[in-house]
Amino acid sequence: MPVEHRWLGLDRRSIPYAVVAFAVLALWAWVVPWVDDQVAWDDTTRTGEAFRVTTEVSMSVPPGWGVISGLRTTDEPRGGDQARDVEQTVLTKDGVVFSIQQGPFDESPIRLLDQVERITGAGSSGYHVSGETRDITTAGGLRGVASDFISADGSGTVTAFVVDGQGIDVQVAGPETQVTRLRSETDAMIDSLTQDGGDS
């Protein structure tokens, strides 16, 4: 008998991704502006650095992004548990938060995107999808889907991939003017996602 993965009409496996989506909205709306006003970042990305998104997927990051959490490809994982250390990557710059959550998921990217949007929309004031869902393919050949959103506090993009049974949920969120200004950098980060030593 197949394992039941549904809870209140939602796929339970997608709930962690949606929780992160809501947390990202809260993070850039309240936490990041306060932190930016209080302290200077002491851990920022440098030219040529890459981050481990899953144990098989990595991403290049432009310089000048503050690192809230994440594992550089040159870092040694704590206790040798790389899978645990790369569970979430959160970067910020000028009020924009770039967040990646990954975990087991064996359905389609559109299914993951739909679940994340449904839960995030239910928990965020004024949240609604803006425009059509679009297919994307990264320079490294990863295929996914993306959609833009608007909320009471700003705007952003949700992008979803599924690579070898791992769901990858990418969130970009922040004040609309800042999201627009940094779009070339955030788009480049998403485009750089690649499966190391293999095909998607």
Image: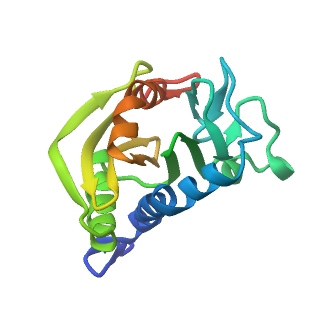
Rendered view: 34 above or below 176: below
What percent of the width, then of the height, locates residue 155?
Answer: 31, 49
Placement of 8 over or under 113, stated as above or below: below
Q: Nearer the viewer, residue 90 or 197?
A: 90
Q: Nearer the viewer, residue 106 or 54?
A: 54
Residue lying farthest bottom? 8
The reply to whether residue 34 is in sight is: yes
Q: To which quarter of the image does residue 12 belong?
A: bottom left
Residue nearest the viewer, comparing 59 with 47: 47
> Residue at (66%, 17%) from the top-left corner?
48
Horizontal relation, residue 117 to residue 169: left or right:
left
Count how many numbered circles sit on residues in the image.
0
Query: How are the residues colored?
Result: rainbow
Q: Residue shown at 34%/73% (left/top)?
A: 123
Q: Which quadrant: the C terminus?
A: top left
- Is residue 20 at all visible to an observer of this figure? no
- Determine whether, in the image, residue 190 is placed left or right of residue 36: left
The spot of residue 5 in percent (x, y) is 37, 72
Name the residue rendered at 29%, 30% in the picture: 136
Instruction: Say which of 180 and 21 sits in front.
Output: 180
Image quadrant occupied by the N terminus: bottom left
Task: State the image quarter where residue 120 is shown.
Answer: bottom left
Q: Is residue 25 left or right of residue 154?
A: right
Residue sitting farthest toward the left:
132
Q: Position of residue 49 (x, y in %)?
A: 67, 24
Residue 126 screen position, x and y as percent: 24, 65
